[in-house]
């Protein structure tokens, strides 16, 4: 899928080693999300070195790539490892490489996402070659040690008014509040914690809620 055709699915699954486990557990978790309907997954590994991260990324690509071209794999932070693992894109935060530096590495056709936490950051990211923008944390979250201030649904609404690019909302999003986030203007919700228990069933429920 080329960037010009980018349309985000309602659910953006985060496969984080810190929560999903490593090795076989990580792979089983990712496969269960795909079985539940997920077509967009971000692999996040902030604990292991580059060699281990690349090994896991390549195994994810091998396992999930066999499911067809509809599965898009995004690497968190590391543009170089995204290329090496033949992922479909990269997602960077405010403290990572700049979007334009990443674009020079990954080329014009891979997806590039950027995390933002306030209107100023989002407006700045909107001017870059990023394909989609993320805003959050929408609600209180336990998946980051030092989370940015909560933006709430109003933060999502403000973000929607500032960009025409696809908008991903992240942070404390569950099946109980996901619909309100989409109604506030997000195109997709990125989820970690509420997918961990029974990932296939949880993903299926998200898609039923977010039709």
Image (spheres, rainbow, N blue to C red):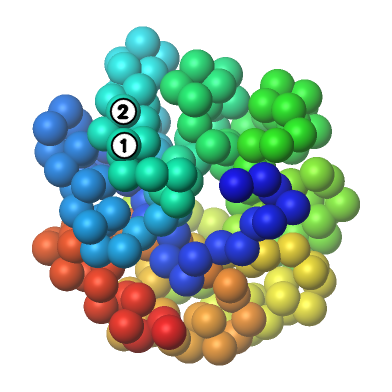
Q: What residue is at 49 percent from the left and 32 percent from the top?
A: 87
Q: Is residue 158 visible?
A: yes
Residue under label 2: 62
The answer to whether residue 99 is left or right of residue 39 is right
Mark 1 and mark 2 residues within 8 Å of each other at the beta carbon: yes
Quarter containing the C terminus: bottom left
Label 2, residues with CA under 10 Å away: few <14, some 14-19, many ≥20: few
Name above or below for residue 134 compared with residue 151. above
The quadrant where residue 2 appears: top right
User: Depth check: 22 or 204 in front?
Assistant: 204
- Residue on which disc 1 sits: 66
Position of 88 relative to 116 (above/below): above
Q: Secondary structure at mark 1?
A: loop
Mark 1–mark 2 distance (CA, rounded to whole Å): 6 Å
- State the residue at coordinates (51%, 81%): 181
For the point 28% across and 54% down, the residue is 34
- Can residue 142 be spotted in the picture? no
């Amino acid at each position: 899928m080329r960037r010009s055709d980018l349309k985000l699915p309602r659910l953006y699954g985060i496969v984080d080693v810190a929560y999903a486990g490593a090795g076989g557990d990580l792979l089983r978790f990712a496969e269960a999300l795909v079985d539940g309907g997920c077509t967009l997954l971000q692999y996040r590994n902030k604990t292991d070195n580059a060699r281990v991260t690349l090994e896991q990324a390549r195994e994810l690509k091998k396992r999930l790539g066999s499911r067809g071209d509809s599965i898009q794999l995004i690497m968190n932070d590391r543009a170089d490892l995204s290329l090496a693992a033949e992922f479909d894109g990269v997602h960077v935060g405010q403290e990572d490489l700049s979007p334009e530096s990443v674009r020079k590495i990954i080329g014009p056709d891979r997806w590039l996402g950027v995390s933002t936490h306030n209107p100023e950051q989002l407006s700045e990211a909107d001017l870059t070659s990023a394909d989609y923008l993320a805003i959050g944390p929408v609600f209180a979250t336990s998946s980051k040690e030092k989370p940015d201030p909560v933006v709430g649904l109003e933060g999502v609404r403000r973000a929607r008014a500032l960009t025409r690019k696809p908008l991903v909302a992240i942070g404390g999003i569950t099946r109980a509040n996901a619909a309100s986030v989409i109604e506030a203007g997000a195109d997709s919700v990125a989820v970690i914690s509420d997918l961990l228990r029974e990932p296939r069933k949880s993903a299926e429920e998200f898609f039923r809620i977010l039709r």
